[in-house]
Amino acid sequence: MQLVLLIGAGGFAGAILRFWVSGWIQNGFVTFPLGTLGVNFIGSFLLSLVMYLSEFKGVFTEETRVFLTIGVLGSFTTMSTFGYESFKLLEQNELGLFSLNVVGSVTLALLGVYLGRLISVNL
């Protein structure tokens, strides 16, 4: 139960951070979603840092790692997890799975948006 509460608290913090950071980065850019691009890069970098420091250096306790990765960074950006998991496949020389994950994730995300739009427009 403690981990669930930590994830929830981290999720709250990450969502607020996403709102602030994305807005700050986006300021002045009207046509390109630079804010989203920025938080996805920052989140991917931070998730990688936390995960590798945990894996190789034992820097974070499980509670801290879960709070930061699933909680804070999970709501800050889901792109961070996608980037980390894709890179892990590359590290393991799983090029086929890497390609499937990258192409599949982007394709399914776009398909999901398309289907959501299609359904909502036709309701």
Image (tube, grey):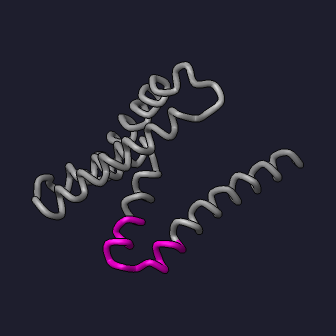
Q: Is residue 90 magenta?
A: yes
**Residue drawn at point x = 34 percent, y = 43 percent:** 72
Q: Is most of the magenta stretch helix, strand or loop?
A: helix
Q: Is residue 113 magenta?
A: no
Quadrant of the rendered image containing residue 55: bottom left
**Residue drawn at point x = 45 percent, y = 59 percent:** 82
Q: Is residue 55 depicted above or below 99 in this figure?
A: above
Q: In the image, is 11 to the left or to the right of 56?
A: right
Q: Is residue 6 depicted above or below 93 in this figure?
A: above
Out of 63 and 58, give the one closest to the viewer: 58
Check the image and name the residue furthest to the top: 28
Q: In the image, is 51 to the left or to the right of 42?
A: left
Quadrant of the rendered image containing residue 9: top left
Out of 99 and 61, give the one closest to the viewer: 99
**Residue drawn at point x = 82 percent, y = 52 percent:** 118
Q: In the image, is 79 to the left or to the right of 14?
A: right
User: Residue 95 location, x and y as percent?
Assistant: 44, 78
**Residue drawn at point x = 28 percent, y = 46 percent:** 68
User: Residue 64 location, x and y as percent?
Assistant: 20, 49
User: Residue 49 location, x and y as percent?
Assistant: 24, 51
Stretch of the chain drawn in magenta: 86-100
Q: Quadrant of the N terminus?
A: bottom left
Out of 60 and 83, give the one closest to the viewer: 83
User: Residue 12 location, x and y as percent?
Assistant: 39, 36
Check the image and name the residue furthest to the right: 122
